[in-house]
Amino acid sequence: NKWDPTFLSFQINSIFDSIEKGIKAKKSLILFPESALPLHLNREPLLEEKLLDYSQKITIIVGALSGEKNGVYNSTFLFQKGKKDVAHKVILVPFGEEVPLPEFFEKLINKFFYAGASDFLTARMPQDFIINGEKVRNAICFEATKPELFEKTPGIMVALSNNAWFTPSTQPFLQKRLLRLYATLYKTTIYHSANSADGGIFPPESAIFNLPWQNDLF
């Protein structure tokens, strides 16, 4: 269980090891899954400083939480050339990240089933990064299979998933089928990183032989 504090050091070192392997392999970008760092990354200055240092040699995209005064976001962090950018999730998983019921029932369910935790906060609209000169849409797990995230045909999308919630089940297989469909439907190449399941690159059928970053991604 990666949310167990006793495993946190192992998880962080695993991230560092993967980054160093990517640098050694001379890749320009490394993509980690949703919540790969199970902590409020914006409140960990030493860890952020280390990732910023690594980003001088390789662009890093990693999922983590963002803790703010008014609540917590499920976020994607981009570290690139010594700078940081953050994009937050827009569409939450019902009864996983939010309770889609009136406030009274929301608080009651969160109290008894989620140890009093609050629903995650959300961004108002889909958010884009600029990565190696390309505009890239951010998507986190569930929302990568929602039409709202493909507004204005982004062209390139990074999708980070935590599929451990759903294993063993058919969810990873169904998610891949939907990503392939949406890639073609919205003419967008999707770069997918998942834990507990294989990720992959899902291009529109017409672009399968001409993919940006095809040889650069670790």
Image (cartoon, grey):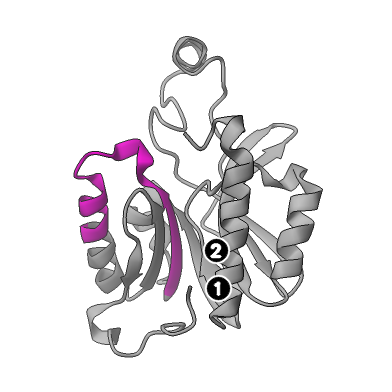
For the question of whether residue 48 can be seen, the reply is yes
Look at 42% across and 76% down and name the residue there: 155
Expressed as whole percent of the image width and height from the top left, the position of residue 53 reads 76, 67
In the rendered view, would you say 65 is above or below 100? Answer: below
In three-dimensional space, the C-alpha distance between marks 1 and 2, rounded to whole angstroms, equals: 6 Å
Residue type (three-letter) at the residue carrying disc 1: Gly
Label 1: how many residues lie within 10 Å, few (<14), some (14-19) or many (20+)?
many
Question: Is residue 146 within the magenta segment?
Answer: no
Q: Secondary structure at mark 2?
A: helix
Residue type (three-letter) at the residue carrying disc 2: Ser
- Highlighted range, magenta: 156-177
Check if mark 1's residue and mark 2's residue have beta carbons within 8 Å. yes
Label 2: how many residues lie within 10 Å, few (<14), some (14-19) or many (20+)?
some
**Residue beneath disc 2:** 18
Kindly indicate the quadrant of the structure image that contains residue 59. Answer: bottom right
In front of the other: 152 or 84: 84
